[in-house]
Amino acid sequence: MDTPIHNTKDIEKLLTNEATALLEHRSSTIPKDQLSLPGPEALDKVFGISDRNTRTLINLSRIYNHGRLAGSGYLSILPVDQGIEHTGGSSFSPNPIYFDPENIIKLGIEGGCNAVATTFGGLALHARKYAHKIPFVVKINHNELMTYPNKHDQIMFGSVDEAWNLGAAAVGATIYFGSAESNRQIIEVAEAFERAHELGMGTILWCYTRNSAFKTEEQDFHTAADLTGQANHLGVTIKADLIKQKLPDGNGGFKTLKFGKTHPDMYEKLCSDHPIDLCRYQVVNCYMGKIGLINSGGASSGESDFADAAKTAVINKRAGGSGLISGRKAFQRPMKDGVKLLNLIQDVYLNQDITIA
């Protein structure tokens, strides 16, 4: 592991008036000793007794043992598929050098990331130069966005075998749980993950919720702890090795929208309104942390990005999560500043003063 650049006081300064609430919180929901927590031995403890074959264990180990967080059990992944998901213009206009996918890979390397996750086309152009220098995660499906009106769908852009040919350590895929097309997506991604494991690659699932009914005038429940937690629980069921999820910012989606099944303890005992406890409920739904939860970094907001990144990392780490997968905050600024932001995220996980709540 590398030495942190940012110390505890630096992180406290970024957290401002939320520092005490976030750094000193003690969770009274699910005790941390009931969780499988990240650490140097986590890969052996979880996957060493699983059905993952030797080649899959090697590739997961490649990811966990690369970059500044190598050997810690934590992950910092650079994801850049927004050129498809959000249009290339909206994604890369703030910093046009990233229209060239080689710079995406360079940012992942310079930023000390465990892996870089991007598209078939971008990785195919540079596989021979970089596949042995940083683990590749190939995003195999996307929302093509050009259908009008837009719909909540993810379609395959290539095969798992082609990802293997590129030297990928893992494949990534998205399912829009709750969408009209989700049943087909679940079947497609489950089959893809089975093939990826056969070939010896890890699997990462973007577990997003999508349904226009999930957003009311009062609240957007797409990021409610109960809905995202259940999405995670479905994701680990189809054998994702890592879950990518948005940080929760509320709860009570099932109750308010009046669908699904609930139990009072979901809201009264297993969760509170504290952001760390909301995130812990997501971890709990990843088989009590046996499958690592990596939260997404979210959109770039400009000057507040460094503070927002530090806050998200602190919440994820203290909840029992396994790291962050942050893209726009890093690549929508000059590369040297993107490297600084990625290093800040990593320093939260390297910091021994920031403990599990």
Image (tube, grey):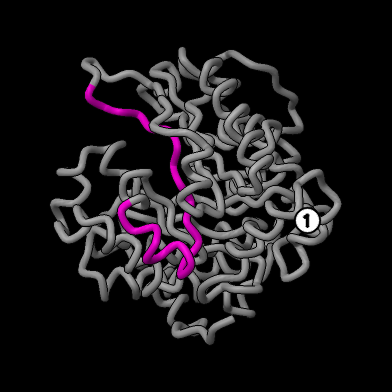
Q: Quadrant of the C terminus?
A: bottom right
Q: Which residues are magenta?
A: 125-146
How far from the left and from the top, in percent, is residue 310? 44, 66
Callout 1 environment at 10 Å: few (<14), some (14 to 19), or many (20+)?
Answer: many
Give the residue type at disc 1.
Ser
Q: Quadrant of the N terminus?
A: bottom right
Q: Nearer the viewer, residue 126 or 64?
A: 126
Number of numbered labels in the structure image: 1
Instruction: Report the residue at 44% width, 42% height from top.
Output: 139
Instruction: Report the residue at 61% width, 32% height from top.
Output: 226
Instruction: Report the residue at 20% width, 43% height from top.
Output: 88
How far from the left and from the top, in percent, is residue 176? 48, 26
Instruction: Report the residue at 76% width, 48% height from top.
Output: 53
Q: Residue 144: say if magenta.
A: yes
Q: Nearer the viewer, residue 208 or 224?
A: 208
How far from the left and from the top, in percent, is residue 153? 40, 22
Q: Does residue 18 appear in the picture of this structure?
A: no
Q: Nearer the viewer, residue 203 or 5?
A: 203
Q: Residue 190: say if magenta.
A: no
- Residue that label 1 marks: 36
Q: Does residue 300 appear in the picture of this structure?
A: yes
How far from the left and from the top, in percent, is residue 90? 18, 43
